[in-house]
Image (spheres, grey):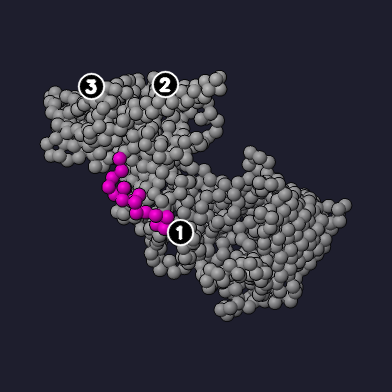
Amino acid sequence: MPEQKKAMLKKLLLLSFIFLTSTSAFAQIRVDGIVADAKTGERLPAAHVIIEGTYTGTIANEDGEFSLIVRSFPATIVVRYIGFETQKKTIDRNHSEPLDFLLKESVAEMEQLVVTTEDPAIAIMKEVIARKKIWRAKLNTYRAEAYSRQQLLNDTTIVSVTESVSEVFWDRKKGPREVLKSRRQTANMEGADNFAGVSYLPNFYDDELDIAGFDVVGITDERALKYYTFKLVDFTSIDNKIVFEISVEPKRKLQPLFEGTIFVLDEDFALLSVKLKPNNVIVFPPPVQDFNLYYEQQFSNFGGDFWLPVDVRIDGLVEVGIVGLRFPPIGFHQVSKMNNYQVNVTMPDSLYEDNSLFSIDSTTISKPDSVFTNTVEPVPLSAKEEAAYKTLDSTATLEKSFRPKGFLTRFIDWDEETNDGETTASVGTSSSEGGSSGNRTSRKNGFASKLLSNLSPVGRFNRVDVFNVGLEHERRYYNRRLRSTVNFGYSFGYEDYTYGTALSWWPLANTRRFVVSAKYHADTFSSYESDLYGMTFASAMPLFGFDDYFNYYRNEGLEIGTGYRPPRHRFTYRLYYNYEEHSSINYKTSYDIIGRDNLQRINPQIEDGTLSAVRFQITRGDLTNNFGVVELNGASLSVEQSAKVIGSDWDYTRFKINLFKRFNTFYKKRFFPNALDIRVNAGTYLGDLPVQKNGALDASFGYITPFGAFKSKRYIPYQGASYFAVNAEHNFRSVPLEMLGWRNAPKTGLSIIAFAGVGKTWNTSSNITRYGLVGTNDLHLEVGGSVSNIFNLFRFDLAFRIDEPGVFPGVSVARFF
């Protein structure tokens, strides 16, 4: 009997649970309807629909349709739209019919304005700014529910739809955070590619807004009257209150600002709605050809003290292309709405444990149907969006939708679709992988295929090697934690083989912070080090009959090294030991492939001998040379110690520094502000430094004048045992052209650059005589100017040398960023 009672009690508890949960489910109903003009029947998109006395609400879609979850009854549904009378309807729990609202135009008379020299909008905006300052000071935090939907469009066709439900948090001091609750998307999109959200969207009541990477002064900032011209252009009404329609125009032509229309509610002096777009200062350089954004946002106080965002609607269009390669226009549309605000509540500490704006609720992310159906009021899908959900499958990839056109596409190999419907592309030809996919598989599994796939030809040309050609094999093993390199070649000039092998090992699992390496080489080396150019790159000069950039010697030796970057540390520390045999190469040729008959200089002798040295190096940032195409921020400091006690023929200590740094200067609110780029290159020594350990101050490759090299010194660099150089250039972007009245200059990508350089080398007089060193007599001084991004590819430089007057034109790759 007790067991029967327990079983009966279990059943009663289960029935009670079912009843309670069912009651909870049935306690809410979803109300659907439309909002339209009572006179014309025209639908009213983005009409604000709320439950009276709450922060709960939604907006109508572009067809005037809305959907709202009601949880307590009776409930009064309120619909507002600027220019129309607010309408209310009360429903009970049994309501099941569509709830349509036909709004009547609102008519209100504005008091007669006193005519003054100042536009009435100035006084109105002063009051808006003053009122905002009062209520914003009392707003410390809020949290709200949010729904977002994004479209990508190809011309006018929807390519993808992504939706999300989230909870958004805002703290006056700590900023915004967003927790993603659920998401859904068309079948051609992965959940990981769903970026719909609201935490990164603008609130046009903010003082400053981040628009596409530009810092833009807001229209209600205390400084707004200095940056904007406000004009009263019309008025309408809502609920018998005047609504001022005010135009917004930038006062400053070179400052990223907004333009458009705003609507201000009289008496409350609050923003009701904004319709704004960035001015033409907010543009991007090529390959972006066109960039347009348009924002709409509504605000409501929900019957309280704080005017909070109701929604954000964004339309955008981006066109990308260069000569010979143009992508279809990429359209973007987003609608987001916020409701169920809770103001001045305590924020969970866990939200601000790291700097991430975005996090995912793992308990709800896998339940899109229940979350979208029962917990939020999504803005109803339009007919086109519903069709997109039905017709877009996994094969309708973004790669297909935005495949470029132009003659350069012939160099892009569009592979066939994979089994999962993805399309891949690779630059160059795919002849090495020709044939069917079955053949590819069999080849990949063969030893010869594995060997050849990692084998590549290598070569160079200079007056000593003449042609040095060979092969290099590189491969990674064990989850890419072990890398081996083997190379073999032959120098047809001084008739000797060049060869080497290297091994690098990253022993720590899940990290590349620690490495151990070893290598052996027997090859031609340069007798002065360049931080800009390598020997392969420099091959073009002598190959076409111009002066050879380097001097050379034979180096055969062993290097053992290790490197480590501590966690949460910006510096990398490296330690090397080198044991090398150095010998002079007594050979040179003046051969070139076009027969210029330029007599190349003699390859000078070096100090033959054995080097045994330890080198310590500290690096930070990026020092990957890109010839000034994009910004570099990095530094390297090295100290090398050679000593006879460890088997070396020389006792010396050598110091070397190489630094690239960018400083943003003017127009910092632009996405690409004016910037100053600096390169510092210096070295010195103590003791007995062999000539083959000299440094170099880089020169231009004839008329090719990259950043970091002296543009008025050509073909052969300065060499020195001690040396220093500072090269700097200031990129004014398109600002000078805009100042001259060319308002569309930012769209061309053209940039005006001013540059300067100074440097000096120090050598002993005996070394200059014996080894034919090219050094500076005194300071090398140069200044000049450039026009960059010509045809989106090149820059033209004009350098003026000061210490030895002369004019030196040149070209180089454009500075894009």
797 versus 176 height, above or below: below
Question: Image check: 672 left or right of 1?
Answer: left
Front: mark 2 or 3: 2
Q: Position of residue 497 (x, y in %)?
A: 74, 73
Q: Considering the numbered disc 2 on the image, is that residue within a helix, a strand or a loop?
A: loop
- CA neighbours of label 1 inside 10 A, class few (<14), some (14 to 19), many (20+): some
**Residue drawn at the location 28% of the way across and 25% of the way down:** 93
Front: mark 2 or 1: 1
* Cα separation between marks 2 and 1: 49 Å
Q: Considering the numbered disc 1 on the image, is that residue within a helix, a strand or a loop?
A: loop
Region of the chain picked out in magenta, as a range: 380-399
Q: Which mark is residue 247?
A: none
Q: Residue furthest right?
A: 645
User: Would you say residue 383 is visible in this rendering?
Assistant: yes
* Cα separation between marks 2 and 3: 25 Å
Q: Which mark is residue 344?
A: 2
**Disc 2 residue type?**
Asn
Which is more N-terminal, label 3 or label 2? 3
What residue does disc 1 label? 421
Question: Image check: 571 left or right of 66?
Answer: right
**Residue drawn at the location 31% of the way across and 43% of the way down:** 381
Question: Which quadrant would the N terminus be assigned to in this image?
Answer: top right
**Disc 3 residue type?**
Glu
Is 383 covered by the magenta stretch?
yes
What residue does disc 3 label? 267
User: Would you say residue 735 is visible in this rendering?
Assistant: no
* Cα separation between marks 1 and 3: 59 Å
Q: Residue furthest bottom?
A: 595
**Residue drawn at the location 28% of the way across and 45% of the way down:** 382
Which is more toward the observer, 332 or 98? 98
